[in-house]
Amino acid sequence: MNFKTLAGIDHLKTINPSRFDGKIGLLCHAASVDINFKHSIEVLTELFGERFTTIFSPQHGLIGNVQDNMVESQHFIHPYFKRPVYSLYSETRAPTEEMLKNCDIIFVDLQDVGCRIYTYIYSLSLLMEQAAKLHKKVVVLDRPNPIGLREEDMEGNALDLKYKSFVGMHPLPARHSMTLGEFAMMAKALWHPKCELEVVSVLKLTREMQYEETNLPWVLPSPNLPTVEAAYTFNATVMLEGTNVSEGRGTTRSLEIIGHPDFLAWENLDGTNKKMQACGLEGFVLRPMVFRPTFQKHADQDCGGFQIHVTDRKKFRPWRVGQVLMQEFYLRLGEKFLWKQPPYEYEYHLLPIDLINGTDQLRLWIEGRGSYQELEEIEQKSLKMFKDVRKNFLLYS
């Protein structure tokens, strides 16, 4: 097969390994694979041999076996590769000096999903902060953003730092339309200027490409994102983590289906569709359904709801669809709709929905039965400013 695109891990193989002096570490996860599905740990072992000393893992663990928030992974010695694996979702979110003592350079190979609420960008940011203090170099092995890189793909309000947490550390919009490498360049310029950073770019990537057009492998970057489609709908459904509405965890189509035991799917379909049409939202179909989660919210209960089927990715506005859907569930469930209470991501005072949204304005918009125009106003207040900043860090034409 003639592959158009090579991810950073494959680009790295074309670079003389001697260019990277000293001992090597790697921040990676289950989706860190090359074009032939070989894991990056294997690739770096072949490139650097005994100089490759240390492995780090983000949230959900090295092998992607940890399902939920606030469930930590343990440190261990890898039974096959015989190297220490330090979890950066453990008693610490940033690598300690002890963890980094055998590293001069830390490579980062993570498949991000282009959403502010997804935590891998913050694992990278905290690594850059600590690397700067300890005079270590960070090398990002870049990968495509599976939900698009176009300016018009950006959505959502930028984070209000009053609601800073591990699901939102920097003032990004919900859908930022950058690769991990582009984010790293922004992080160096704005927050970690003393970090020595290099980005090994994706070869032959353009901002117009959809993920499947790259012909790169898709491996689950976390346990509940089995498909590229789910990466799109994630931006619409992850907000429901802050409610008692199921976002489909415990099913085979997590983050694509949503529902609640007291929600009547077919009875509410027509009204919900009319609301979406009135808002001008398109590029998707809501299919009424009943599902039964096997774990997490409403485990072993039948939930009425919808599956979001994306029919046109360029027209689909997941963040807006998600906010309107959440308002519909709020209005139609009445007192049976509940906001999740703290703690959430180790924040014990603020409501989880406000941490996820990066503001309380969206919750108040829902509770106040706000109009779609008011939703757009909340979004646009900070989105234009971010667009002006973002354009300084783009790597791909």
Image (spheres, rainbow, N blue to C red):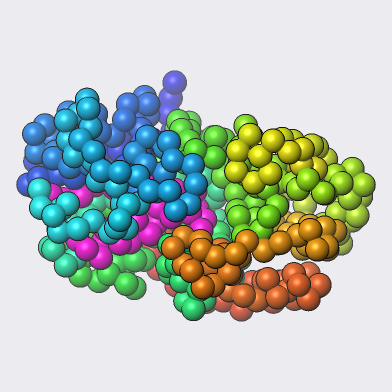
Residue 106 inside the magenta-drawn segment: yes
Q: Which residues are magenta?
A: 103-131
In the picture shown, does residue 341 fall above or below 124?
below
Left-right relation of 267 to 42: right
What is the quadrant of the N terminus in the image?
top left
Residue at image point 33% right, 61% down: 125
Q: Position of residue 235 (x, y in %)?
A: 60, 53
Would you say residue 48 is visible in this rendering?
yes
In the picture, which quadrant includes the C terminus? bottom left
Report whether 343 appears left or right of 46.
right
Write down the quadrant of residue 191 in the picture: bottom left
Closest to the observer, 236 or 7: 236
Residue 36 in the image, given as x and y percentages of width and height: 36, 24
Q: Is residue 390 above or below residue 385?
A: above
Name the residue located 48 percent from the left edge and 69 percent from the top edge.
Answer: 348
| Front residue of 266 and 21 | 266
Comparing 365 with 346, the one in front is: 346
Residue 93 at x, y percent in the picture: 32, 58
Residue 271: x %, y % from top left: 91, 55
Q: Is residue 33 above or below residue 371?
A: above
Q: Magenta includes 335?
A: no
